[in-house]
Image (spheres, grey):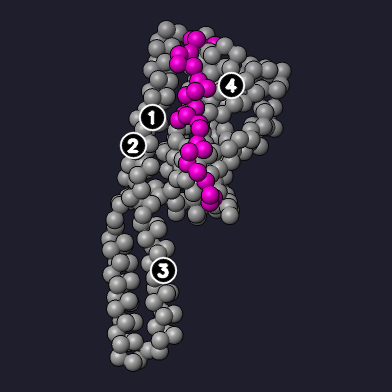
Amino acid sequence: MSYVLGNKQIKKRIGKDIFIYPFKESNLKGTSYNLTASKVAYLASNYMLAINGKDEIVVPPGETVLIQTEEAIYTRRNICGTYHSKVSLVTEGFSHIGTTLDPEYFGASLIALTNHTKLVKKIRCGESIVTVMFYKVRGCDKTMKDNSQNRDDLMPKEFNGFKQNLTQKQRYHLEKEVNKSRNVEWKKDYTSLINIVRKENNIKKFSIQDLIFLLIFSFVIVIVYKLYNNNLLSLEAFISAEVGVLMGMLTWLTDVSKKFRKD
C-alpha cells in the first residue's frame, strides 16, 4: 500500500526517513517539495558548462541542458518519489519532466530540460526547476536500487570548458564553484547528509521526549497490571488495555528504530 505524503508528513519525516539538504520551508508545497538549480549545468550535446557570469544557465534553441540540483536527497526503504515539471518552465517552452525517485536513493538529482523554442532561454541558479512528490511504500527490496549517487554514471568526469564567453577570472571563479558544488561532502557521503539534517533539525537518536514516552508506557502497564491483580479490572478489560498500550508502544518503537537504523 502506498500513498502520497502531504507537507505536514514530509516535514515530520525530515531527519527520520526523508533527508533533504539544504532544506527551505518556502520550497515545501501542499504535497511536494521543489528542488533548485545548482551551477553544475552542462549541455548534453558537447558537455560544456552552460552557466554565464550572471549566475544564469543559458540554453540555446533545440539544446538539452542537464542540471544537478542544489539539494541532496536520501530516503529510507519505505519512501519513494516522483519528479514533476514546473509549469512556469513548461510554459516557456522547456520539456516536461517525468521520472522516479527510488527508495534509498542518495545524492543530488540530475534534471534534463530541452529548449523547444527558437529563442535562447535562461534559468537562474537557485531557481526551482522540478517538483518531487514523496510516497509511503511497502514491499521494496533494497537490492533493486541501481542508481548511482548524484547520477555520476550519467555525468562526465570533466567538462569541456564553457559555452559562454567569459573572462579568465570568471572561468576560474566558476570552475571553483562548480567543483565545490559537485563534490561537497553531503552529496558524496550519505552519513554526512544524515548528520547535517539531524543537526539542523535538532534531532537526537534518543531524545528526552522518547524517554518520557518510555516512562509513560511503563507506568501505564504497571498500573493496569496492579488493577487486575487487585481484582479491580476484569480479564477482558485487562487484555484490552494491555494490547492497546503495547500497540502504542510498538508504533513508538518503530519510530525510534528509524533513528538508529544504519543504512
- Of callouts 1 and 3, the N-terminal one: 1
The residue mark sitting in front, 3 or 2, is 3
Q: Secondary structure at mark 2?
A: helix
Measure how far apart labels 1 and 3 are at the Cα level: 37 Å
Residue visible at 33% across and 50% down? 260
The residue mark sitting in front, 4 or 2, is 2
The amino acid type found where label 1 is placed reads Lys
Residue visible at 40% across and 64% down? 250
Instruction: Please report contact status of discs 1 and 2: CB closer than 8 Å, yes or no.
Output: yes
The amino acid type found where label 4 is placed reads Val
Q: Is residue 133 left or right of residue 90?
A: left
Measure how far apart labels 4 and 1 are at the Cα level: 23 Å
Q: Which mark is residue 188?
A: 1
- Circle 2 residues within 10 Å: few <14, some 14–19, many ≥20: few
Q: Position of residue 254 (x, y in %)?
A: 40, 58
Q: Which mark is residue 65?
A: 4
| Relative to 250, residue 191 above or below | above
Q: Which mark is residue 216?
A: none
Question: Mark 3 = which residue?
Answer: 248
- Circle 3 residues within 10 Å: few <14, some 14–19, many ≥20: few
Say if residue 167 shows up in the picture.
Answer: yes
